[in-house]
Image: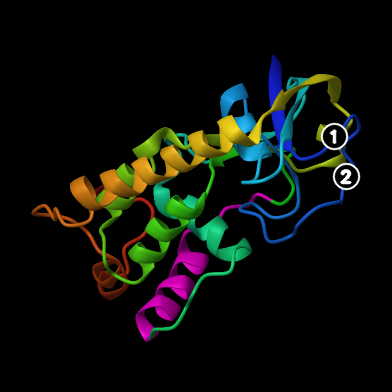
Amino acid sequence: MRKTIFHGSTSVIEKPVYGYGKIRNDYGLGFYCTEDLNLAKEWAVTKDSNGYANRYVIETDGLTCLNLNSGEYTILHWLSVLLENRIFDINTALAQEAKEYLLKNFSVSYKDVDIITGYRADDSYFSFAQDFINGAISVRQLGNAMHLGKLGTQFVLKSQKAFDSILYEGYETADCTEWFSKKEIRDKSARRQYFDIEKNRRQRGDVYIVQILDEEIKADDPRIR
């Protein structure tokens, strides 16, 4: 299948380099893109710097793709990948135990795939994940929170084979005066909805990390799906 993808950056990137970048990104080292042009423009800018939405096409036939948002996985599988790569504030015994349990029981074999798709842990989504491992929200609330603000999903190239499969087609400029404010509005919307709708509205039957640890709940348990 042929897809058009975009990479938001402060630079024009005609040839992405395999093995280059930040290792502490959501899914580790890779080339982080999106199929949404507007999101790429938001991700491209800073408060004071314009950016570029670099456009590529990729043929995915013959590539292995891990979709963390598919029904095969739960939100806790996504979180385990995040815990493996991002730096969380683990400053309580509960959070430390939660991290160890999730990494042991919800780990995903992702390092040898060509492409990963899944949620992007913007500041707001990352803070929601931290709330969960600290026991403040339930699995249901965390899953619902991932849709607030429509912060989008990522399309991440992980392998040399994936890098060899993309073709650069050009770029569109992103003006920081327009797109940074849109990025802030989207993030603030997610946070506002989170506090207004999700965080303080526990439902009967909600499953929290303490219960997951105490009952040793695993991925096949219908209560976390």
- Residue annotated with mark 2: 18
Instruction: Estimate the x, y position of residue 168 in percent, counting from the top left.
Output: 85, 22
Tag 1: amino acid: Phe
Instruction: Estimate the x, y position of residue 211 in percent, counting from the top left.
Output: 24, 69
How far apart in space, not on screen, are marks 1 and 2 (Cα)?
A: 6 Å
Instruction: Estimate the x, y position of residue 215 in percent, counting from the top left.
Output: 26, 70
Tag 2: amino acid: Tyr
- Residue annotated with mark 1: 163
The N terminus: image quadrant: top right
Queried whether the magenta region covers residue 105, the answer comes back as: yes
Q: Tell me: 56 left or right of 124.
A: right
Secondary-structure class at tag 2: loop
Q: Tell me which segment is drawn in magenta.
A: 93-110
Question: Relative to 142, is 63 above or below?
Answer: above
Question: Relative to 3, is 112 above or below?
Answer: below
Of all residues, the one furthest to the top in this rendering is 2
- Count residues near mark 2 (Cα–Cα under 10 Å), then give few for <14, some for 14-19, many for 20+: some
- At x 89% / y 30%, what residue is drawn? 164
- Count residues near mark 1 (Cα–Cα under 10 Å), then give few for <14, some for 14-19, many for 20+: many
Q: Tell me: 105 left or right of 4.
A: left
Q: Which of these two is toward me, 212 or 122?
A: 122
Of all residues, the one furthest to the left in this rendering is 204
Queried whether the magenta region covers residue 133, the answer comes back as: no
Instruction: Estimate the x, y position of residue 102 in percent, counting from the top left.
Output: 45, 65
Whichever of callouts 1 and 2 sits on the residue coming sooner in the sequence is 2
Q: Quadrant of residue 60?
A: top right
